[in-house]
Amino acid sequence: MQNLETLTSSAAGQLEAPYYRQAQGFGYRQPAGIPVCSQTKRIAVVSPVPDRMYDLIREISANCFDVMVFRKLESLTESGPAIDMYLFDFVTEDVYGDYGNIKAFVSHPDIAARSIYLADRGALNGSADGGERTGEQVIAWPCPVSEAMYAIFRMLTKQETLKSTVSAGSDPSIIMYKDLKVDAKRMSVYRGDDRIELTKTEYEVLLYLLEADGAVLTRDEIMQRICGSSFVGGSNVIDVHVRSLRKKLGDKAVSSKYIVTMRGAGYRMADIR
């Protein structure tokens, strides 16, 4: 992947697979035949009237994104799967009264860094919506699909660059997650300089969920990992440990910052990528 600064419209053919169908002028197209995505990214589109964005959604899908479309933010937050990028429609009339909820949702830096907004030019020329966000995160809509795709890949490249940047001499036993630091050698968890006192079981539950990298773990899977196959208690024991862990982390079951409950399934860590 190229660095963000070098990703320009003249960079045709320079970005690597799987993003082989990037918008005309800055991408590489798969030779004739059925295209196969070696890997995909997941993007969530939130629009009250998504059919008005059909051309853009089709092009996003053609560029090896798994596209999830929602009319309301509430449906997105209840969906479960980890999301790599968010695209919010601020052009269409707010028929669901959702704009305030979206602003609250993206107030967390982890979400904001992965969000792009479609806004009309009036919003970009002095309105509150335009003034709150940087030019890299807002697309004046409508615009050519190629311009919107360029903005999406630009943000994606920035994410990949940040993810691949590892400071020299960093300790592989240290896991950074949002504002938490997990020291695997010392079996300790910190927020800033403050240590969060966890029991051994609470620590192991947290570590197992972190290692899953956003995947959903069932209660039985967690119980087998933590308690072993000889444990005869019910899987609701895990619920007790997660409840205690959340309390110590200052987390909550609804709109969780750290540990998300997947109804009827289990738990996963909240989005961070």
Image (cartoon, rainbow, N blue to C red):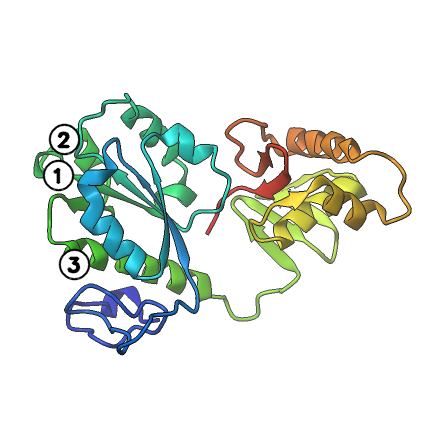
Q: Which residue is mark 3?
A: 146
Give neighbour class at mark 2: few <14, some 14-19, many 20+ (Cα, 10 Å).
few
Residue 66 vertical placement versus 235 (above, below): below
Mark nearer the viewer, 3 or 2: 3
From the image, tell me which residue sits under label 1: 124
Residue under circle 2?
Answer: 127
Between 136 and 173, the residue placed more toward the observer is: 136
Q: Position of residue 94 (x, y in %)?
A: 22, 25
The relative height of residue 235 versus residue 139 in the rendered view (above or below) is above
- The relative height of residue 90 versus residue 134 in the rendered view (above or below) is above
Amino acid type of disc 3? Ser
Where in the figure is residue 32, as x and y percent of width and height?
A: 26, 77
- Amino acid residing under circle 1: Leu
Helix, strand or loop status at disc 1: helix
Which picture quadrant has residue 21?
bottom left
Query: Which one is nearer the viewer's eye here, 64 or 181?
Result: 64
Tell me the mark number nearer the camera, choosing from 3 and 1.
Answer: 3
